[in-house]
Structures are given as C-alpha cells and as structure tokens.
Image (tube, helix red, strand yellow):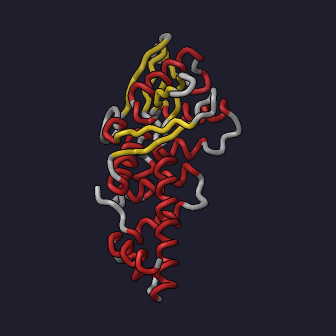
Amino acid sequence: MQGLSASQTIGLWERGSGQHPVDRALTLLASARPELDSAQLAEFGIGRRDRCLLELRESIFGHTLEVNSRCPRCAETVEFSLQAEDLKLGREGEEGSEEVEEGGILIRYRLLNHSDMAAVALAGSVDDARLILLRRCVLEASREGARVTSKDLPEPVVSRLAAHLAEADPQADLVLDLKCAECRHAWKVQFDIASFLWTEIDALAKRLLLEVHTLARGYGWSEADVLAMSSARRRFYLEMVS
C-alpha cells in the first residue's frame, strides 16, 4: 500500500475533522482503498476494515506503533511498542455467511460490518444496539424448519452467536494484555486502530500546516509549494529560517 503525500495527509485531516468516529473510520478506509466507493467500503467486515487501516498506518508511519495506557490502579503511564504485523489476526479478504446451532435453533449469519456500526452509533441503549445488530447480522434463524425472529432468540443462543462472531473475526475486537511496572497490576485494554491512526494523522497534519506557516512567512511560498517539497527539503529550509 502506498503512503500519503503531505497534501493528501492534510486533505484526509480536513475530511475527518469533526466527523463522528464511525464516519471517520470510513474516511480513513477510503484513503486506504481509494479504488472503492463509499457503499463498497461500508460493507467491509470490521476486522477486514481494521486490517486495511493497519496497513495504511504502516505505509505512513512505519511498522512500529508507540502506544501508551494509564494503569487503572496507580495511574502510572505505561508505554510500550507494538509491531503492526503482530496485530494482524484472522482472515483476510471478503466475508461470506456462517452457521451456528444452539438450543435447537440454527442460525445463518454474517460478520458485522462498518454499516452495522453506523446503524448503532445513535442507539438509545445497549439493548437497542444489540437488537439492531441481531436484526442486521442474522440472515436466517429456524427451529425444526420454523422461522425464529431475531427478537425471539433466547439469551443462550445470542451469547453463543456473539462468541462465534468474535471467533470468526478476531481482528474486529483486538484486546491487549498489559501489566504496570510500578504496581504490577494487570489489565486488558481494547486497541482501536481507527482512533490510534486518527490521533497520528491529526498530529502530522497540524505539524505540516505549522511548517507551511513558518516557510510561507520566511520565504513567501504558497502552501502548495511547501507541501510539494520532500520532508528533507522542508526540514532544511525550516532550519534556515529558525
């Protein structure tokens, strides 16, 4: 995957600023897969989407991710490095339907995709969100040939389906095991590549705009002129004007 130019990075930042995190994830994905339209991208399974975002992140910032988290017990900041390749789990490519049977009920379902996340973004409660997801991901449910609606699925069946969804798409729910060096407390934290990547894009775009501001004041160059330069040339001129 090819990285983004300086002007493309700022354009991505402009489009993503102010968006809901779910919409922003789709904006990031569009930069990773520019050959696809928004409707096609919205059908990406969450794991497939996040894998693409990991690859986009690699193309821009490299293979190593510098991560930090705050210990929930002593509030110490824990800093550590991750390799992008170690975060790529499970399947790659397009998704099909799956089946699971529990309590005499046979369910045919598909993996959750980005459009599902958009559908539940404004759900009024956890129960509402769960019902929306069930209605969307359950393609068919039956007991002895008789149809069973999503809202009539017993709790053990729903739990079994949730477990199957997690097993079938581990990339969609990436959890890190952490341990504090100060108090030895161990905990788990979910790693959200869309949020992590956006934080880096936001910082990079603002740095680039600051460089534009500095060089425009020093030399009278336009934004397009400054962004067209290589990073090495920009650094050299920034050293000169400082």
Residue found 48% across the figure and 65% down from its top: 205
Image coordinates of residue 162 in percent, x first then y, are 50, 24
Residue found 45% across the figure and 87% down from its top: 219
Residue closest to the eye, 144 or 173: 173
Residue closest to the eye, 119 or 218: 218
Left or right for 20, reference 204: right
Extreme residue toward the right, this view: 124
Image coordinates of residue 37 in percent, x first then y, are 40, 59
Give the position of the N terminus as an image quadrant. bottom left
Residue closest to the eye, 35 or 75: 75
Residue closest to the eye, 237 or 65: 237
Residue found 66% across the figure and 30% down from its top: 127
Q: Vertical placement of 213 versus 200: above or below? A: below
Residue found 34% across the figure and 33% down from its top: 89
Image coordinates of residue 184 in percent, x first then y, are 53, 22
Q: Vertical placement of 114 versus 172: above or below? A: below
Please tell me how many numbered marks the rendered image carries. 0
Image coordinates of residue 182 in percent, x first then y, are 55, 27
* Image quadrant where residue 154 sits: top right
Extreme residue toward the top, this view: 103
Q: Vertical placement of 55 versus 242: above or below? A: above
Extreme residue toward the bottom, this view: 220
